[in-house]
Image (cartoon, rainbow, N blue to C red):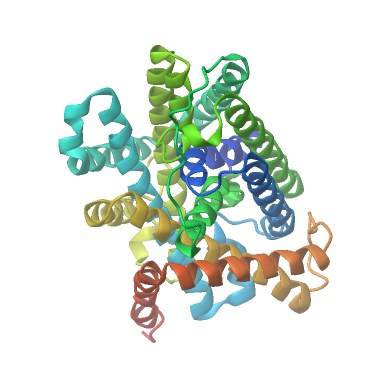
Amino acid sequence: MNQRLSKTLPSRFVLAVTVGGVIGLGILRGPGEIAHTIHSPSLYLLLWFCGGIFVLLSTAVTAELFGMTARSGGTYALVRRAYGGYSGFVIGWVDWLSFTADLALKAVVITEFSAILYPPLAHWSTPLAIIVTSSFALIQLRGISVGARIQEIATSIISLVIVSMTVILFFIEIPESNSIVLPATDGGLVDWSLVVATIVFTYDGWLYAAYFGEEIKGNPSVSARSCIKGMVIVISLYMLLNLALVTSTGLAALAGSELAIAKAFELAKLPLAENLVVIAAILILLGHQNLEYMSGPRILYALAVDGLAARGAQKLGHSGNPTFALMATWIVTVGLISVGGFEFLLFLSVFFYISIYLALIVGVIILRRREPTAERPYEAWGHPYSTGACLLGWVILTSFQAYVERDTAIYAVIMAAVSWPVFRYLSRDP
């Protein structure tokens, strides 16, 4: 007998996971990465703005799938009706792998930031990253209500931190220095690939609420619109923070910095504030470990309910979380932590993200044609023009990243290809 997830999450949880899920490592580390290639303040701000608007439009389109899907399981649950069969399965598989890559990436960065505060920790980066991610896997055994409460608190802290840092940056005075030299860069495809990957990574998470679809109380259309409201908040915070960085510090001083905001406070002779930024960064990333261990296992749960994952993945523990799926997510995450460092995991995560986003947009188009009269509590804004624009944009981004980061793309394809024998085994006749 299948166990089903219960409607235990309040509607405000949608806003909490959208804002808290998107704001994170990208906005902390991204400005320094992008400033290494982009030296024009106007172009720098324009890229952040255009990236935000494109993601907002993508959210306004794909929220239609969220509104009409009363299931937990994220991207797989949203596109199952559109693709079915192996195509639907591989999308769920890739989505799950993207969570394991992201969990590994953020666990590694938590230890890197911790080493800034206490340098001897740098020698223990990998084992500490494993300890961090294991701790949050264990927290989920306490229950979905505990995880949801942690996430709402984390989102409040994240928003307060970003606003506070923005205000401080607007008012600090940084002495001019003629010794700052712009880093050497040829502005080639590899540099631009990192810029694109950073922006995509920083805005990722716009449909986080879809991983809890059947557990959220209230009207589906309200939940869908809350995703859009959440992204408006995120884009506003990002633009204000980047404007503050550009006007207070300048891009040359930020280029290549792992924590651009901490660098700005260092230049302003505020060492205590610099350490507080590092602590805030660690807290934000810890919040993401919590959220992603709530979300990722629900993909395996949804696959298992449809008979496309090990039967044990649909079993719920006394906590209300799918415990077998949780353990599987943890095992793969630990494996990826042992494989590679920041840049490898960043490009791997982003390659999975853009493929998933492309699949979502195509899913909207397929269901519009196949089920034109289906109930849609929320309809994609500006369809079909907005959907077509998003489709073109994600095709270009996917093709560009696959061409420039061919090694990473091959690795991602191999990981996705493993899904075929798994699918064949699971779908065989009894």
The answer to which quarter of the image holds residue 357 is bottom right
Is residue 8 visible to the viewer in this orientation of the structure?
Answer: no
Number of labels in the image equals 0
Using the image as rendered, state which of residue 263 and residue 118 is in the foreground.
263
Name the residue at 39% across, 78% down: 423
Quarter the C terminus occupies: bottom left
Is residue 285 visible to the viewer in this orientation of the structure?
Answer: yes
Residue 347, position in %: x, y?
A: 42, 58
381 to 143, vertically: above or below = below
Q: Left or right? Give the position of 74 relative to 29.
A: right
Residue 120, position in %: x, y?
A: 16, 28
Name the residue at 46% across, 69% down: 404
Q: Left or right? Give the position of 340 relative to 369.
A: left
Seen from this angle, which residue lies furthest front? 178
Seen from this angle, which residue lies furthest bottom? 429
Quarter the N terminus occupies: bottom left
117 to 100, vertically: above or below = above
Name the residue at 60% across, 37% down: 19
Residue 119, position in %: x, y?
A: 21, 27
